[in-house]
Amino acid sequence: MYKAEIDWSHELHETVVKSLATSFGLDFLLFKDKDGGDVDTIHNVRKGIYATEKEKEKYDNRGKYDSHKYHSHRDYIATNKQGKIAHQQGELYDEYTGKTFNDFDKVNQDHVISGNEIHHDAGRNLADMRGEDLANAESNLCFTNENINKKKQDKSMQQFILKLKNEHIERQKKIAELKNKSHLTEQEQKELKKLENIDSANLAKMKEIDEKARANYNQKINREYYTSSKFLKNITKQAAISGFKMGIRQMLGLILAEVWFELKESIPAIYERNRQYFTINDFINDLMSTFNNIWHRIKKKFHTFFIAFNDSAIGGVLSSVSTTVINIFFTTQKQIVKMLREIWGNLVQAIKLIFFNPQSLPLGQLIKEVGKIVGAGIAVSCGVMVNSMLSHICLFPFGTEIAAFCSTLVTGIITLGVTYYLENGEICQKIWSFLDKFSDNSTKRLNFYREVNKKLDCYLLELYQLEFNIDTEQLELFSLRLSSVNNELERSFILKEEIDKRNIKLPYEMGNCDSIKSWLNSR
């Protein structure tokens, strides 16, 4: 299998420069990453993490909890009436204890999730839903005895259950003390009844009721918010902005990198030409020539820049959407947001290569190229982590710049390490060779002649460096004869004739495929 000859120092220089210009340069100017991403989610706002100042201000101005509004709601009143009728008929039972109420029991209607908690819920506020409607949903209303309801107050069920558990032993002691008395006052009888009512609470049942109520409550809020035009508008807007910024970042970064590569080549030459004899006209001409070369270099690669813009824009859109989706369930740290952006940028290139395969690469070579792209994404992610760690350490002047340089250096070294292993690793070579066997015959033949062409190019370069001992007229005549023929067969006859004439010894026999293959395998 043909192995590409790579100038590793040149590749490291290009990788570091491009990373400095894109991932660790313009990225910090164009993107202001923050915990939780750029779109508000219910999960994040409940943790106090807001993507927009507008939603934070709306929550801060929510107003005080008004108990009267929650307890005078039409659904609360209607359910209470139904409960009274059932109580009179002896059919009402305490949902927190499982016992049926008798005629003399004082019955209260309880909000499983308290009205106070619902009013101050940032998720409900984000979804623009009325707290009174949610609090008085059927799944959030339960009948229980007055003692349990007053004991619970506006605590969450989890807090209330924990409180009951902590007070259980002390409550049992008081109940035992009162029962051991031979005579109880009216006040003591009420106290005993109260303690027994509270102690009769079925904690497992209460937990089950709370879980069901919260599941229904959260389902309503999630459905309302995540299907709302507000959320869809925000996610679309941020995805478009992220895509545009990512495309601009990549395109400008590559342009700046090309500018630097040209300057790196031109500056030493300008210095050498002007250090002995300096004139302002010559110096200006040199600068103009350099700028002209830069312009031609950029024009020549404009198509490449445009493709980079498109690929990166798609990656930016997908990274923004995926970041928002993740934040529905978890809160992403800002370095994770950046890592997702970099990974998606490389994944888009890999997906394009897999589905379109513009160079018609055989399977093994295709997987190898995809591996290089994915490896580059992983390398940038490692660089992001290094940058995040160093930014907390390098707090001295120019610390940010040093952190960025170290990060890009790590990115470049890992990228080249992955590339070298994929190109030269013994195991990788076996894998690529095995996968290439699955290519069809036409692809194998095309790949074979590509390798032949590459090796012939290398051999011709070696020949070019030799002295042929022919004058320019003979060379021009030979060139004209080659260019005048219209097919490879005639061209091969002319080449064979010239080779025989010059007594050039080839390492293979012309026209013998087995000889050519043997020579290629020996290289």
Image (cartoon, grey):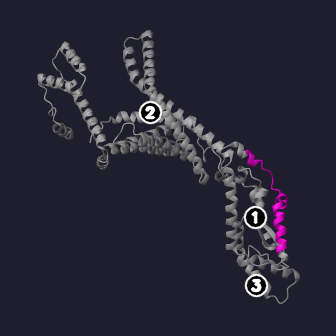
Q: Quadrant of residue 353?
A: top left
In the image, which residues are magenta? 57-86
Q: Amino acid at mark 1?
A: Glu
Quarter of the image where the C terminus is located = top left
**Residue 340, percent across and down?**
52, 45
Write down the residue under mark 2.
Answer: 17
Whether the residues at callouts 3 and 1 have beta carbons within 8 Å, the answer is no
- The residue wearing badge 3 is 176
* Among numbered discs 2 and 3, the one appearing first in the sequence: 2
Q: Which residue is mark 1?
A: 138
| On screen, residue 429 above or below 248 | below
> Residues at badges 1 and 2 in contact (C-beta under 8 Å)?
no
Quadrant of the rendered image containing residue 6:
top left
Query: What residue is drawn where x is 75% and y is 46%?
Result: 58
> Mark 2, mark 3: which one is toward the viewer?
2
The span from disc 3 to disc 1 (Cα, nearest Å) is: 38 Å
Q: Residue 73: within the magenta?
A: yes
